[in-house]
């Protein structure tokens, strides 16, 4: 019985971590709610860049108002492959964003997650692969942390989340 109570408490803490970001209201928002146009099909358009984003990570499902489920993780190579020709919301030209595009949706005033949770509901504070390889060697690629918004290098063999985009480049 104690184990069951512990599990329920742990599950509620995880859900709370995913559902709410910790934001500093003294810092101007870099991606306020009006920075995005809701397309009412599981996508939003970032008004500044014109890029259309999937609101959910791959592996999550858009239920009409939120992202449900848990995002899947992929190695960098698998992320590139799955994004090629991916179909969603009537479009077949989804792709992995480059590191600058992905970093453009980081909310600098928030962490855990560092993203606008109205535009991208139920986003975990985790790493997401962009398409950008490292110039420092063939084993590395860039990634964006939606825990704190940092852009850094990591090994392509590790598995992280994927969020797809269309347009631009």
Image: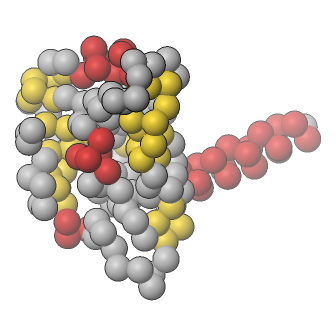
Left or right of 24 on screen, residue 105: left
Is 47 situated above or below 44?
below
Residue shown at the point (37%, 62%) measured from the top left: 107
Image quadrant assignment for residue 139: top left
The quarter holding residue 2 reads top right
Quarter occupied by the C terminus: top left
Quarter of the figure with the N terminus:
top right
Compare residues 166 and 20 and report the one nearer the observer: 166
From the viewer's perspective, is 19 left or right of 99?
right
Residue 44 visible to an observer of this rendering: yes
Query: Percent position (x, y) of residue 81?
Result: 27, 14
Q: Is residue 14 above or below residue 114?
A: above
Q: Is residue 72 visible?
A: no
42 over 59 or under it: above or below: below
Residue 92 drawn at (x, y percent)? 10, 24
Residue at 15 percent of width and 18 percent of height: 85
The image position of residue 31, as x and y in percent, is 28, 65
Residue situated in front as seen by the camera: 158 or 133: 133
Q: Residue furthest front?
A: 136
Identify which residue is drawn at 14% across, 45% down. Answer: 52
Indicate the colouring scheme. Answer: secondary structure
The residue sitting at the bottom extreme is: 26
């Amino acid at each position: 019985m104690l184990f069951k109570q512990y599990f329920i408490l742990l599950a509620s803490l995880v859900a709370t971590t995913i559902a709410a970001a910790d934001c500093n209201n003294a810092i101007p928002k870099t991606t306020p709610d009006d920075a995005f146009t809701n397309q009412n099909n599981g996508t939003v358009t970032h008004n500044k860049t014109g890029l259309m984003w999937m609101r959910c990570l791959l592996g999550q499902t858009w239920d009409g108002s939120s992202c449900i489920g848990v995002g899947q993780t992929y190695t960098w190579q698998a992320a590139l492959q799955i994004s090629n020709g991916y179909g969603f919301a009537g479009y077949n030209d989804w792709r992995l964003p480059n590191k600058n595009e992905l970093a453009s949706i980081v909310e600098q005033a928030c962490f855990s997650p560092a993203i606008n949770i109205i535009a991208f509901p139920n986003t975990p504070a985790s790493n997401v692969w962009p398409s950008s390889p490292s110039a420092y060697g063939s084993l590395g690629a860039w990634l964006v942390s939606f825990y704190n918004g940092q852009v850094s290098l990591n090994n392509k063999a590790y598995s992280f989340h994927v969020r797809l985009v269309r347009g631009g480049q």
